[in-house]
Image: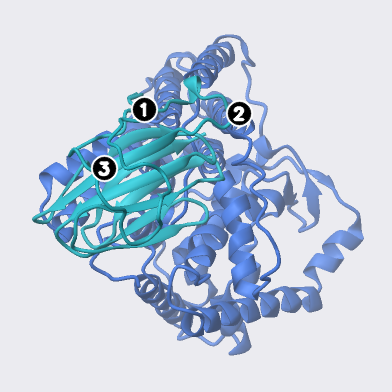
Amino acid sequence: MILTAAAIITAGCGGSNGSDSASGSPSGSQPSSVSPSDMPNDQAPPTRLVIDVTLKGGEVTPTNEQLQAAVKEQIVIRVNSDAADELHVHSTPEHTYKVEAKPMQSFQFTVDVPGKVDVELHQLGKTIATIQVQ
Amino acid sequence: MITDRSVAVLAHGLGGSTDLPIPFTYALIGAAWALTLTFAVVALAWRRPRFDPDKPGRPLPRWVTAVIDAPAARWAAAIGALLFAIWVAFAAFTFPQDARNPLPGVFYVLMWVGLVALSVAVGPVWRAISPVRTVHRLLGERSLGLRYPESVGYWPTVLGLFAFVWLELASPNPRSLGAIKIWLLGYLAVTMAGALCCGGRWCARADPFEVYSVVASRLSALRRNRNGRIAMGNPFNHLPSLPVRPGTVAVLAVLLGSTAFDSFSATQQWRNFVDDHTGSTATATMLRTAGLLVFAGVVAVTFWLAARTTGGVDRQRRLELPGLMAHSLIPIVIGYVFAHYLAFLVERGQQTIISLFGLADTQVHYVLSMHPSVLATIKVGCVVAGHIAGVIAAHDSALRLLPAGHQLTGQLAMMLVMVGYTFTGLYLLFGG
């Protein structure tokens, strides 16, 4: 079993936040690595799970990544894309975000019901990551 | 908007999150129990067969049978289910054609998992509520009077069940409303045509839901005695009454193999494998279809070989053994179905009912998902209990079927195969 909770930083990003949800956090490219063991649930420290996604020439990185997050933890997906697509977050309830063909878009959500959550690019039909939320 | 281009690998054909993997310790404890109890059963348990499908159960009061068999009650259940089916069809075509549509929930949750739970609880209900049977009855049970060939047995059901699990686990887009509608229309057309040609026997042999319901009902404590009276009895006496027909082993192999494939296809290794080796929707679908076939095939072949691996029987008997032992797979299938789909049934079931009847102000209670350790315990419990019941049923029928002198050695291969199923099941639930 892979316990790497390390969020993947593909590019040194920075700059403006994208279309959908404005995350109020600073745009520094700090690798945020969260595993449930070092994050007690009762006092909510400002940890986030950041997933950097690059969509280029019909290829997406990463794919089928295994990640972990806590219930109600901020999960941020930052997308650099050269094509329009749709980002599906198969949590309960589900989230759907429009991905446009532009760099630095970011989508933020939390998951309230524990479970395995697939994050998927719909048009491309690829699973970016499966997040174990517990 | 849902487009049909997607090659999404959605668990269970529905969106939303899936269960967390069970923790390693739970898997180990479950496996240890399964192994210990298997050997305890084989080595120490009874030496004479105890379970007998002809043993009558304890009859319930007469009025229970009278009420259940009353034509009014039969018609009420059948018409109620038909109206429900019509409402679902109405919702499928007129409700918003997106993720909120209740059709996938009705199809994958209520019809597939809910039917099993109901059949285990009260018996083979699909026969009483099948919309095709009801329509056929409303038409006066007219048929062309063709004879259903006995040699075909359950094979049409095997195809039907495979078509279902293919849509759920291997098709390009399992939640596509269009695909589900086509599947259901095909099912209705084939079953209706069969009923009009061969009468009710077609439904009993070739309707996948009816056969699945009958298979699950053999684990029910409720049954009918020979005189038709409804009775309560030991499910182990009920299990061997599973009809042995051509295709019985294949029915169980598709059910068990597909549930295992459902877990397997969610693993990272399999998804990477599919991504690396396929370039298009079509090839990915073909690869998943092959995977599904391999899983069902492995179950069928291992069980078939293990049931035949015994000395002291003639050719004819050896040929019959896999069918005669097939009922011992039922508890394993049902245990695994509950381990795998219980949270899905309870939570998606609520969601489906809410969206089907527009109960906007009702909330879904995530009773199981919110307590992952309780859920994990239930899952391991289901797998281990199913396994033990399977081993006991197999042991007892080995005593009944195998000649003296080969009763211990003759069931060793079967026990090994069953332990293998359990370990594989726990391993897959553990997350690969």
Chain shown in blue: B
Q: Amino acid at mark 3?
A: Asp
**What's the residue at 40%, 57% (across, down)?**
A21
Q: Position of residue A129 (x, y in %)?
A: 31, 42
Whether label 2 touches label 1, CB < 8 Å: no
Disc sitting over residue A33 in the figure: 1
Q: Position of residue B223 (x, y in %)?
A: 72, 50
Mark 1 surroundings within 10 Å by alpha-carbon count, few (fewer than 14), some (14 through 19), many (20 or more): some
Residue B196 located left or right of residue B65: left
Q: Amino acid at mark 1?
A: Ser
The quarter of the picture where residue B188 lies is bottom left
Q: Earlier in the sequence, mark 3 or mark 1?
A: 1
Helix, strand or loop under label 3:
strand
Q: Earlier in the sequence, mark 3 or mark 2?
A: 2
Q: Position of residue A15 (x, y in %)?
A: 25, 49
Q: Nearer the viewer, residue B414 or B345?
A: B345
Q: Amino acid at mark 2?
A: Gln
Disc sitting over residue B413 in the figure: none
Query: Are discs 3 and 2 located on one and the same chain?
Result: yes
Helix, strand or loop under label 2:
loop
Establish if B389 lies above or below B17.
above
Residue tagged 3:
A52
Query: Are discs 2 and 1 located on one and the same chain?
Result: yes
Asked if one can make out residue B92 in the rendered structure from this viewpoint, the answer is yes
The CA distance from mark 3 to mark 1 is 13 Å
Q: In the rendering, what colour is chain A?
A: cyan
What subunit carries mark 3? A
Helix, strand or loop under label 1:
loop
Residue B57 located left or right of residue B243: right
Q: Nearer the viewer, residue B7 or A16?
A: A16
Mark 2 surroundings within 10 Å by alpha-carbon count, few (fewer than 14), some (14 through 19), many (20 or more): few
